[in-house]
Image (cartoon, rainbow, N blue to C red):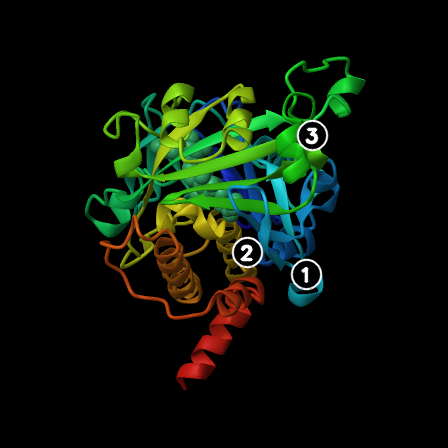
Amino acid sequence: MKASSPFRIVVVGGGIAGLAAAIALRAPNRRITVLEQSRLNSEIGALISLQPNATKIVYETFGLRKELDGARGMVDEGFRVYSTDGKLVNEVPLTTAEYGASRIVWHRRDLHDALKKAALATDRDGEAVEIRVSSRVVNCDPFSGIVDLESGERIEGDVIIGADGIHSVLRKYVVDSDVTPLPTGHSAYRLMVRVSIFSSAMLTRQIPSDTLEREEPDFCRKINPRSPFTSMMVAHDCRLIMGPGRQGEVFGIVALVPDERMNEDPNGKQSWVSEGSLAKMLDTFSEFPDWVTDIFKHSRDLGLWQLRDIDPLRTWYRGRVLLIGDAAHAMLPTQGQGASQAIEDAEALRAFFEEQTDSPLLEDISSIFENIFQSRHDRAGLIQGYSRQAAKPGTAAKGGKTVTMKPDEFMAFNCKYPGAKEWLRRQKAAKA
Ligand SMILES: Cc1cc2nc3c(=O)[nH]c(=O)nc-3n(C[C@H](O)[C@H](O)[C@H](O)COP(=O)(O)OP(=O)(O)OC[C@H]3O[C@@H](n4cnc5c(N)ncnc54)[C@H](O)[C@@H]3O)c2cc1C
């Protein structure tokens, strides 16, 4: 009997969305290739959280416990809001029991490495994923399933997954026009500070001299940098969102400022990896007390970027190409759902392609893509909208539907996600 042709899947982009999709799609008789433009060794030094909806998927549906257990994630037990004189003014606990899973904070590099390990593992379903670095896709024919690399090489897949981020190259082949990510009126600095000499760094004898507990006792007395909470502080229109990572070894800070308060060049090149100036940041945060701003100077890496998102797209697929992650629904980080939505996309791919063991026909692909789109588009669009609303006033002038859910309703909407197939079934039942 002739062996059936393998199902060839090409994933463009090796970020969280692309790697999660590759892991999710692993199955016998499938050949999965990830094309990543970078060398994949410079994931930035920032913390990222996976919300309960995504935690459930990575642990239970994808079975990544082995890989993630080594990645030093920290369960986040809730939000704490502080006044600028260091008083705790509000605490909103996040209980695992309520959502059946925890919010877990990771160092991006650790999470990315764990996903890479799972994609490459030889002891999981199907063949190990092939990850090709320094492979920038510059062109795509959505109906033949061919992508062209910058090097001139052509690669063909039955299905092409566009996981190439907010500045996606594949998006224009899907929606047939250029979609420019919109400035949302906010910019953000990101910093990472070491907390203590009593950390794993000590075990490796790389004792850092510049640590929060040693140098900034005043801050640590008011806000314990090891407490597993996300802390927030607001003064006028600037906010700090802070919390521990790597089991309390590091403390991550995201500092949001409206663009008009920016003391950096707002038209300069700002992305995940561009550098900010400490002097300018301190000037912008001059309304915060010294005990807070003093911690900024201990960061070895000050990133700056202008926050952008996109409006919901009219479609996510065309021919053999489907967009996922930020390429499909880039959103503001106010609800910490960007990576979690990318993981929900990956789960949808797994669920709707479950039966497909060999090379699919275009008509089968279209009907599967339509199911993925139907199950995911409105949900991700609502989270995009809510994330934008939560960044007001900087985003007050932007369009998009107003989401009227209260914060606790929105948390339940996000976190009690039952998976793409069940979500679609409920949506259809509600409309019937
Ligand atoms: C400040 C900030 C904080 C955030 N915090 C959180 C959080 O706490 N929780 C959360 O869930 N989300 C958070 N997010 C959002 C989250 O980081 C993203 O939504 C998520 O990582 C989506 O990943 P992605 O893989 O779609 O895109 P990306 O991470 O951008 O990955 C895209 C990949 O594609 C590659 N690529 C691009 N173009 C090409 C090409 N032409 N050819 C080949 N490769 C290409 C890139 O090199 C990159 O590796 C945050 C975002 C920001 C800005």
The one nearer the camera, 59 or 208, is: 208
Circle 1: residue type: Thr
Circle 2: residue type: Glu
Q: Is residue 298 above or below residue 12?
A: above
Q: CA distance from mark 1 to mark 3?
A: 23 Å
| Residue at (64% x, 39% y) in the render | 222
Q: Is residue 177 above or below residue 140?
A: below
The image quadrant of residue 271 is top left
| Marks 1 and 3 in Cβ contact (< 8 Å) | no
Q: CA distance from mark 2 to mark 3?
A: 31 Å
* Disc nearer the start of the sequence (1/3): 1
Q: Position of residue 320 (x, y in %)?
A: 36, 50
Question: Mark 3 sits on what residue?
Answer: 249
Q: Position of residue 29 (x, y in %)?
A: 59, 47
Residue 12 can be seen in this image: no
Q: Position of residue 227 (x, y in %)?
A: 69, 42
